[in-house]
Image: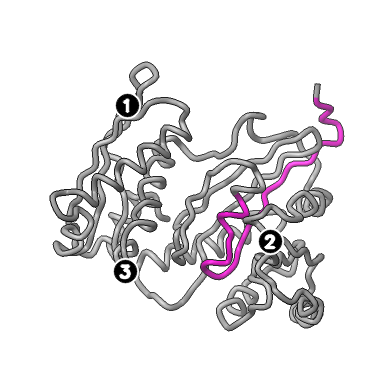
Amino acid sequence: MIDYSNYQTGYIAIVGRPNVGKSTLVNNLIGHKVSITSRKAQTTRHRINGILTDKQSQLIFVDTPGFQMQYKNGLNSMMNRVVTQSLKDVDVVLFVIEALHFDERDNLVLKLLPDNKPVILVINKIDKLTDKTRLLPFLEKLSKEFSFATIIPVSAEQKIQLPILVDTIRPYLPESRPLFDEDDITDRSERFVAAELLREKLFRMTGDEIPYATSVVIEQFKIEGSLRKIHASILVEKANQKAIIIGKDGEKLKIIATQARKEMEQFFGNKVYLEVWVKVKNGWADDVKTLRSLGYE
């Protein structure tokens, strides 16, 4: 039986430039995959909450898109707005950077950090360091850039120091009963998760440019007993992008769909029937109505 008299619950935003490992950090902090990942930057497009509940606290980690100013279309504007809004709505901020790397892209995010709530600097990918003696001067330099509550070096991928990070966050959370059930790991719907898992395969299994011109729409999501029937459409900007995703004799699309289905079955714990089509919708990434229908605000 959990004693809620001194229980702490709060929201923790995870922010940083693209590709510093924010989604991997969320997934490994809560012990479940709720945010999709790939080696390509800007994989995350939505605000996604990952929930970690224990006997002392409920930590609601808010994974955000990587903040950037390189691309100026409607989609990226909405993604950047998700970051800035998330910073206003949370109790604690984790500013994630890569060990020994701090450039203008990181500085752009640094300028957004609030001065009225605790900001913890998380130095990620310390497992990649060949010379760890360089880390201390790097930390000393960064500590002069902002008044961080504390600095924690971690490896999100190898789960190094993640328990220490959780223990560091907890005292900054307000006293409150949990907001979600003990078994919840995210507040997102199964329909949303299905779309994200399919989109992840596009990022992982297509070239450098194609994933950024695509999005996924779940046209149908039905549960029949222990079977989930899912019909999905991949939106692309141009006909030649459609041809690339489908591949010769439909082989590329078949592989993408098969990999997505297997991951869905692992997440849902049940069988999945998945059908996927590719549709051309020119200009979808700049069309406000389309973006809102896809869940971007």
**Magenta region:** 2-26
Where does residue 32 sit, x and y in percent of width and height? Answer: 58, 41
Q: For this rendering, which residue is in front, 199 or 288?
A: 199
Where does residue 95 sit, x and y in percent of width and height? Answer: 67, 66
Q: Can you say whether 196 is above or below 243 in the image?
A: above
Which amino acid, by three-letter code, is at mark 1? Lys
Disc 3 from disc 1: Cα separation: 32 Å
Q: Circle 1 sits on which residue? A: 222
The residue drawn where x is 39% and y is 57% is 204
Q: Nearer the viewer, mark 3 or mark 1?
A: 3
Residue 197: image quadrant is: top left
Disc 3 from disc 2: Cα separation: 29 Å
Q: For this rendering, which residue is in front, 261 or 186?
A: 261
The circle on residue 140 is: none
Where does residue 167 sit, x and y in percent of width and height? Answer: 81, 49
Q: Residues within 10 Å of mark 1 (few under 14, many from 20)?
A: few
User: Within the magenta stretch, is there residue 139?
Assistant: no
- Which element is circle 1 on? strand
Q: Circle 3 sits on which residue? A: 209
Disc 2 from disc 1: Cα separation: 37 Å
Which amino acid, by three-letter code, is at mark 3? Glu
The circle on residue 94 is: 2
- Which element is circle 2 on? strand
